[in-house]
């Protein structure tokens, strides 16, 4: 995968557009026109961000947004202010600039897990994208974009929550509801460690 920086007028404050060439060599020069939906966004805390990933209208896939909002509630009374929270349906390269200003980020995502799995809190390091898609990234690939563009990445972790149903609707499966307390405990652990 090759990453090029090309100046473009009227683009980002840095005047740069990232073009990501996949294995097949296809380049998408229009990625900057695709904006993630941001139904929930809180003012940026100077050093940490929780990003809930997933579609709240697809059953268990909405657990990322649910837990991100709970992170905002849990930290609302902190002396340093609430943690910044963002809910997105997918990660896009536009988030790299925001990540570059952070000390810590937690990605929360649904995980198509085997029966009986528990939530996992794992460290993340920048890594190449697992596919040639240029419109959405996994958390490790987004960190790699951040490092290439801005020369740094925040300390990053991912909270993976076992998910079992992705049907249309807002209801969470009984299996996911059963592991939500363990997911909340891991979220609190991350918040406490990054206060």
Image (cartoon, rainbow, N blue to C red):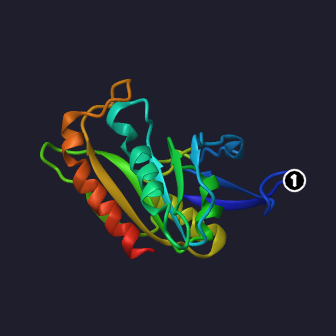
Question: Looking at the image, is 1 positioned above or below residue 114?
Answer: below
Whether residue 128 is visible? no
The residue where tag 1 is placed is: 9
Residue 171 in picture, x, y percent from top left? 32, 29
| Nearer the observer, 183 or 2 | 183
User: What residue sits 50% from the left and 60% below the top?
Assistant: 76
How many labels were placed on the picture? 1
Q: Is residue 132 left or right of residue 170?
A: right
- Image quarter hosting the N terminus: bottom right
Q: Is residue 125 left or right of residue 35?
A: left
- Image quarter hosting the C terminus: bottom left
Question: Looking at the image, is 118 positioned above or below residue 55?
Answer: below
Q: Residue furthest right?
A: 9
Question: Looking at the image, is 45 positioned above or below residue 90?
Answer: below
Whether residue 9 is visible? yes
User: What residue sits 27% from the left and 61% below the top?
Assistant: 185
Packing grade of label 1 (10 A; few <14, some 14-19, many >=20) is few
Q: Residue furthest left?
A: 116
Residue 131 in picture, x, y percent from top left? 45, 48
User: What residue sits 26% from the left and 59% below the top?
Assistant: 120
Residue 51 in picture, x, y percent from top left? 48, 54
Residue 179 in picture, x, y percent from top left? 21, 48
Q: Is residue 151 left or right of residue 189?
A: right
Secondary structure beneath disc 1? loop
Q: Residue furthest top?
A: 168
Question: Looking at the image, is 172 positioned above or below residue 114?
Answer: above
Q: Is residue 178 left or right of residue 109?
A: left
User: What residue sits 39% from the left and 30% below the top?
Assistant: 58
Instruction: State which quadrant residue 15 falls in.
Output: bottom right
């Amino acid at each position: 995968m090759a990453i090029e920086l090309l100046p473009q007028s009227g683009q980002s404050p840095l005047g740069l557009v990232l073009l990501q060439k996949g294995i097949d060599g296809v380049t998408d020069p229009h990625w900057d026109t695709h904006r993630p939906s941001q139904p929930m966004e809180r003012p940026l805390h100077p050093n940490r961000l929780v990003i809930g990933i997933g579609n709240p209208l697809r059953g268990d896939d909405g657990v990322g947004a649910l837990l991100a909002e709970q992170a905002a509630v849990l930290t609302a009374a902190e002396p340093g202010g609430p943690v910044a929270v963002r809910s997105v349906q997918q990660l896009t390269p536009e988030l790299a600039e925001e990540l570059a200003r952070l000390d810590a980020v937690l990605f929360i995502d649904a995980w198509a897990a085997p029966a009986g799995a528990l939530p996992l809190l794992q460290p993340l390091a920048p890594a190449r994208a697992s596919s040639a898609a240029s419109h959405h990234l996994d958390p490790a690939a987004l960190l790699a974009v951040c490092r290439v563009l801005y020369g740094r990445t925040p300390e990053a972790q991912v909270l993976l929550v076992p998910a079992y149903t992705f049907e249309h609707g807002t209801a969470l499966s009984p299996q996911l509801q059963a592991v939500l307390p363990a997911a909340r405990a891991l979220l609190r652990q991350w918040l406490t460690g990054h206060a």
